[in-house]
Image (spheres, helix red, strand yellow):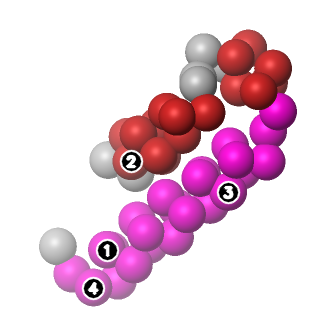
Amino acid sequence: MNFAHSFNNWRKYRQTVTELGRMSDRELNDLGIGRSDIRRVAREAVR
């Protein structure tokens, strides 16, 4: 995996974490995501 690809994946991960982190617990619950699951969901999003 080259540097550019890794960097883009990291940016997508950070963006996903930020966006999910801004959601309320109720919004996350509606999506079936717990606050403690945000990083896992973000990792899965960049695979």
Pointer 2 or 4: first along the chain: 4
Q: Nearer the viewer, mark 3 or mark 4?
A: 3
Give the answer, above or below, for where 27 lies relative to 22: above
Quadrant housing residue 27:
top right
Q: Which residue is mark 3?
A: 18
Name the amino acid type tagged 1: Ser
Name the amino acid type tagged 4: Phe
Local packing at callout 1 (Cα closer than 10 Å; few below 14, some 14-19, many 20+) is few
C-alpha separation, residue under disc 3 versus residue under disc 2: 13 Å
Residue at image coords 47%, 46%? 39
Q: Which mark is residue 43?
A: 2
Q: Which residue is mark 1?
A: 6
Query: Mainly helix, strand or loop, the magenta region?
Result: helix
Contact check, label 3 and label 1, Cβ < 8 Å: no
Contact check, label 3 and label 4, Cβ < 8 Å: no
Pointer 3 or 2: first along the chain: 3
Q: Which mark is residue 3?
A: 4
Pointer 1 or 2: first along the chain: 1
C-alpha separation, residue under disc 3 versus residue under disc 1: 18 Å
Q: Nearer the viewer, residue 2 or 15?
A: 15
Where is residue 1 shown, x and y percent of the image?
A: 17, 73
Quadrant housing residue 26:
top right
Q: Residue furthest front?
A: 36
- Residue stretch in magenta: 2-24
C-alpha separation, residue under disc 3 versus residue under disc 4: 22 Å
Name the amino acid type tagged 3: Thr
